[in-house]
Amino acid sequence: MNANGDSYYVPDHKGESAYRDKASKFIGLAFPVSTEAEAKEAIAEARKRFFDANHHCYAYCIGAAQEVFRFNDDGEPSGSAGRPIYGQILSKGLSDIVVVVVRYFGGTKLGIPGLIKAYRAAASGALENSGMKEKILLKSISVSFGYQHMNDIMKISKAEKLEITKQESGDNCKITLRVKASRAETVIARLRRISNIFISVDV
């Protein structure tokens, strides 16, 4: 998340990569997701696509503060797969993403250091190939008011450069404004100086 709390970085699209070591093949897959349910669907998709792979290790991270996360070694030695994948997501500063690395065992054991290196490399390549874009955090403020306050509401909207997403006119007016998260409290404070209006906020 940026310093103002207005945005964070997410993948632009799906990404894929491949890495080989001692005949073992590692395929990294990065998927943009918005929810934990979508992350689980992406993992299921990878398992179905590479049904014959020996391991399907993964990590995902969701939310502006990367607050929802999980990683899994899927049968590899503890800490050798899921955590290195998760570490790559954090190092890139991304969220709303799941990375699955599938492994086809080549017959020679790599040892834990070798596994960590391989899973890290495959995850890094998939992340690089998924691109990056900024996701703006916005809040919607709904204001109900009498028509006599229309000019006051519009002055605040113009001064704060707010986007009007919905407007209902009449004796009882209602307007929905979209504002950057970091400016929401300031806008609400300005609106509350107007008497006899009702304000509600949706993320």
Image (cartoon, rainbow, N blue to C red):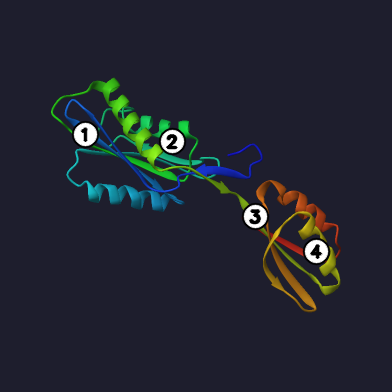
CA distance separating discs 4 and 3 = 17 Å
At a point 34% along the width and 34% down the height, the residue shown is 82
Q: Which residue does the numbered mark 4 point to in the structure image? A: 153
First in sequence: mark 4 vs mark 1 = 1
At a point 55% along the width and 40% down the height, the residue shown is 65
* Amino acid type, callout 2: Ile
Left/right placement of residue 152 relative to residue 101 reads right
**Which image quarter: residue 55?**
top left
Q: Which residue does the numbered mark 1 point to in the structure image? A: 25
**At numbered mark 1, what does the secondary structure look like: helix, strand or loop?**
strand
**At numbered mark 3, what does the secondary structure look like: helix, strand or loop?**
strand
First in sequence: mark 2 vs mark 4 = 2
* Amino acid type, callout 4: Ile
CA distance separating discs 3 and 1 = 45 Å
Classify 10 Å Cα crowding around label 4: few (below 14), some (14-19), many (20 and above).
some
At a point 27% along the width and 22% down the height, the residue shown is 114
Q: Which residue does the numbered mark 3 point to in the structure image? A: 139
Residue 16, given in percent of the width and then of the height, sits at 32, 42
